[in-house]
Image (cartoon, rainbow, N blue to C red):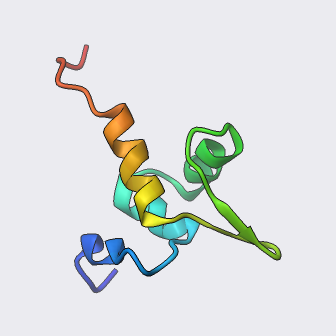
Amino acid sequence: MDKNKFDLLDFNKLLKASDVADLLNISKAFAYQLMRQGELSFIKIGNAIRVRPIDLQNYIELNYSNTDVE
């Protein structure tokens, strides 16, 4: 991706699964899995699935942890 990946957090732009995956440093398949399981809210427009940046921000905040990784 050419732009700084956090430039995608323009709150007027809907994110593709590939954008979500890039921002979270996960696979696109895992991004879809988060949506399918209801952990990450999304919007369906026809066959297209998009995520609002605010929903991605909320997901990150809900899953933020200050504890050590085991």
- As drawn, is 4 to the left or to the right of 27? left
Query: In the rendered view, would you say 39 is above or below 11?
Result: above
Residue 22: image location, x then y, percent: 40, 63
Residue 21: image location, x then y, percent: 46, 59
- The foreground one among 55 and 22 is 55
Check the picture and name the quadrant holding the N terminus. Answer: bottom left
Pick out the residue farthest to the top: 70
- As drawn, is 26 to the left or to the right of 39? left
Query: In the rendered view, would you say 68 is above or below 52?
Result: above
Query: In the rendered view, would you say 32 is above or below 5?
Result: above
Which residue is drawn at the image coordinates 28% and 33% (left, top)?
64
Residue 7: image location, x then y, percent: 27, 78
Pick out the residue farthest to the right: 46
Locate residue 37: give its quadrant. top right
**Number of marks in the image?**
0
Check the picture and name the quadrant holding the C terminus. Answer: top left
Pick out the residue farthest to the bottom: 2
Which residue is drawn at the image coordinates 34% and 78% (left, top)?
10
Query: In the rendered view, would you say 16 is above or below 40?
Result: below
Which residue is drawn at the image coordinates 55% and 46% (left, top)?
40
